[in-house]
Amino acid sequence: MPNVDLSSLSSHLKTFTMEKVLAAVLVLLVCLLVIKVVTRLTEKLLGRVKRLDPRMNRYALTALKAVLYILTALIVAQSLGIPTTSLVALFSVLSLAVSLAVQDVLGNVAGGIVILFSKPFQIGDYIETDAVAGTVYAIDLTYTKLDTPDGQRVLMPNSTMADSKIVNFTELGTRRIDLAVTASYDDAIQTVRAALLAAVEATPNILPDPAPAAVVTNYGASAIEYHLRCWSKVDTYWDARNTLMEEIKASFDRRGVTMTYNHLNVHIMENETNGLL
């Protein structure tokens, strides 16, 4: 840890003169003018970079102002005859103490900067992470707020978000509906496939391109497993999926397709000598 000589600093405060004070005030005014000019120029330059998020621009300007104000304090101190080495050492001690106290917060800030710069998602996108899935409500510097389908608002630390696998369902504009359905071995495959595709045709908000598909995926112990795949717009995905689930049952009933389920058959056999077994 750097050695801060506060006694030396206090001794220099006793040597102030009116000339030094006036010179320091003039230097301060010049520095404030320079800060204003540099800030405006930086703001214009950042505004031309279309990729940067507007919030990222604000955070960058705030950081730049903080650095410029620290430099201004050092320059004014130098004009007053105060040794800047002592001030630099003092700032170092304070910054170290603050960084240790808010280590987790700084990690979230770093994660927020990564998210705002790389833009893996935007406000309104439906995303899924390792821990939660929901619609992005807000992206702050430390937390990302998600609204889950069950009506909860979850605040995820940005450090966790930056390290997680993120699936963005909104980015491409469309989303695939993928349903697994079972049918009896007694039902012809072509009949079941036709019933599934008919259910798709009866469901609103299903896109014709890519074309819907119904395929056999597994021969189970008591049923054949089919997968129905079709596409919908992101904003109508859940309505289309829920309606399609209902239409599949109705389509199976119209065509006499048996939708199997787990059940237990008990066979009672009669023995001629001992009665029932």
Image (tube, rainbow, N blue to C red):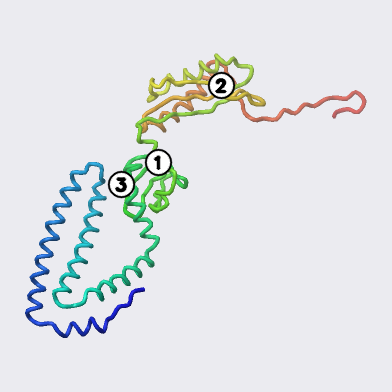
Instruction: Please identify the quadrant where the N terminus is shown.
Output: bottom left
Which is more toward the observer, 96 or 136?
Answer: 96
Q: Which of marks 1 and 3 is in front?
A: 3
Which is more toward the observer, 35 or 268?
Answer: 35
Which is more toward the observer, 69 or 202?
Answer: 69
Q: Distance between the residues labelled 1 and 3?
A: 18 Å
Question: Which of disc 2 and disc 3 is earlier in sequence?
Answer: 3
Please provide percent x and percent y for residue 213: 47, 20
Q: Name the residue under label 3.
A: 117
Instruction: Please identify the quadrant where the C terminus is shown.
Output: top right
> What amino acid is at disc 2?
Val
> What amino acid is at disc 3?
Phe
Question: Which of disc 3 and disc 1 is earlier in sequence?
Answer: 3
**Which mark identifies residue 127?**
1
Q: Mark 2 points at which residue?
A: 216
Helix, strand or loop at mark 2: strand
